[in-house]
Image: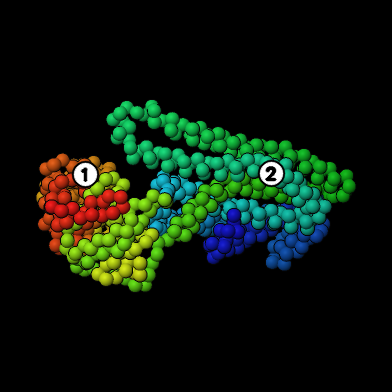
Amino acid sequence: MFRHFVAVYPARSLSIIVLLSVAGLAEGFSVFALLPLINLSVAGDAASAGGVGAWLTQAVASVGLKPSIGTFLVVIVVGIGLKALVTLIAMREVGYAVGRLMTELRQRLIVALMNARWSYFTERPLGIFANAMGAETIRAGATYQQSARLAAAAVQAVVYGVATLVISWRIALFAVFAGLVGVIVFRRAVAMAQESGIRQTELMKSIAVRTTDMLQGIKAIKAMGAQRSAMPLLDHEIRDLDDAQRKQVWSGEFLRVAQEPMLVVFLAIAMYGAIEFSGEKLPTMMVIAVLFYRLFNRFQVMLEIYQVVCTGASAYWSVHRLCSDAEDQRERSSDRTLTARVAPLIELRDVSFAYGEKAVLDGVSLRIEPGEFVALCGASGGGKTTLLDTISGLLAPSHGGVVIDGNDLREFDLTSWRHCIGYVPQELLLLHDTVYQNVCLGDPAISRAAAEEALRAAEIWDHIATLPDGLDTLVGERGSRFSGGQRQRISLARALARKPAVLLLDEITAALDRNTEHEICATLRRLAGRMTIIAVSHQPEMLRVADRVFEFTNGQAVQVSR
């Protein structure tokens, strides 16, 4: 896992590794100082320690310091202090890296989703994306942090291993052997944590999807008193998640608790062997005991951290796969742009489209004149919305094509064409934000004056102006502070604020009363001519004010005589 992070974030990861290595060297220097210190305390002579102890004694003397207990204590304190300082700097880098990782994952996911084909969204529940942006990205960041801690523990293990090897190669080999035994004995606990992590990732996706779906329909659920019957839809996943989390906690605690007796057993064996067979002196024995304990403890810590990494890695890979999948579904782009500052001529030439084996459009040919107001009616599932989606480029016809002012849409960049379109869906998108933000959707090119102009064109400004906060009025969750007709007009203003050449409307009056429907249709009639309007509707008033009406039957579009 850490190798992957190093490959993705080489510069910062390399700096972390270098800092951890420096911290490890400082700690190793302090450990080596124990040998002459203990020798001074027991034998009264630091140089008699031999080997590393003698070398360190000479090094201290060469800089004009007296090789005394106080001197070596200062060396130990300075070394540990330096190790702590450098480790803190390294962990600060880790903190920056974790924040950058989560930010880049979220940005990558958002960009990938914004550029993905429309069909990619119709095949997946939205809760998956919400879960990836939230919980999974946080777990991914925590996994990077734990991977850095694993690298730090590995560096420390190397330092203690080298120190032990210098003093007693037999004890060093035995410590490595003990560590390998620990890995073998506890591999099942690590595997259990990994399985639990994968299971948790899948269950949290499922819970996020179901929760999103339920909250979208919470009004109907509460209105019908269906809370009790709705809860079991989540119970199964919640109970399974509880089981997975219990297994994770159990495996972690088992690993932490069970390693201590093993450490004591191996330490006793090492000390017995060093005393009975190696004949080590007491000062050396004391240092060996400290080194063996620290080295084996590093193996323990590495195993515990690795277990945590295995638990969280599935979340990182889940977000990574989701980003890759969305990027693979990237919408077609082209260097050729298609713009329309005035209402264009729109032609559909022998357009066919099918969802699976079900044909929705079958050789539809239409010619919509510039500035014309066209209404599309017909039975549900007849292909009306699909036709709007082909005009906007959200769906690509399986046969035939869409031609704009003589230009085949397939040869041009779709985003450039969509900048010419205003779209108002049947299911309104109103953010829990101000009226202004709902009109501009964060587009800095749409000023407050432009938003006001669009609201006037949608004939809702007179109402907005009477509100205490005007454009800064919060619309409430999904526009709950406004009536259905007012929400439709705000959505219409959002489309008009972009100065569209083409306005696409999908059943925008279906849920409105007759008077409100009549008012909105009158507004649209006044807008016709300045832009091409194509409206899907079953309502008589919409059909009455349109220039032409096409009825969809069996995948065909037939003009209705009036």
Instruction: Tell whether 158 sits left or right of 204.
Output: right
Work out how far the residue at label 2 is from the one at label 1, CA to CA, in angstroms. 61 Å
Q: Quadrant of residue 104?
A: bottom left
Q: Nearer the viewer, residue 189 or 318?
A: 318
The image shows residue 33 at horizontal and vertical percentages of: 72, 56
The image shows residue 240 at horizontal and vertical percentages of: 52, 34
Task: Name the residue carrying label 2.
Answer: 187
> Where, quadrant-wise, is the N terminus in this rendering?
bottom right
Q: Nearer the viewer, residue 42 or 325?
A: 325
Asked if the residue at tag 1 contacts the one at tag 2, i.e. Cβ–Cβ closer than 8 Å, the answer is no
Task: Give the residue displayed 42% in from the left and 42% down from the top.
Answer: 209
* Mark 1 Cα shell of 10 Å, populated few (<14), some (14-19), many (≥20): some
The image shows residue 219 at horizontal and vertical percentages of: 29, 35
Mark closest to the chain's N terminus, 2 or 1: 2
- Residue 552 in view in this figure: yes
Q: Quick check: 466 above or below 15?
A: above
The label on residue 28 is none
Q: Nearer the viewer, residue 61 or 348?
A: 348
Instruction: Tell whether 434 sits left or right of 278.
Output: left
Q: Residue furthest bottom?
A: 336
* Mark 2 Cα shell of 10 Å, populated few (<14), some (14-19), many (≥20): some
Q: Quadrant of residue 67?
A: bottom right
Inspect the image, locate mark 1, and give the three-letter code of the amino acid beneath it.
Answer: Ala
Inspect the image, locate mark 2, and give the three-letter code of the amino acid beneath it.
Answer: Arg
Task: Give the residue displayed 27% in from the left and 71% down from the top.
Answer: 406
Task: Name the residue carrying label 1.
Answer: 510
Task: Give the residue displayed 35% in from the left and 38% down from the top.
Answer: 215
The image shows residue 300 at horizontal and vertical percentages of: 67, 45
- Does dot 1 land on a helix, a strand or a loop? loop
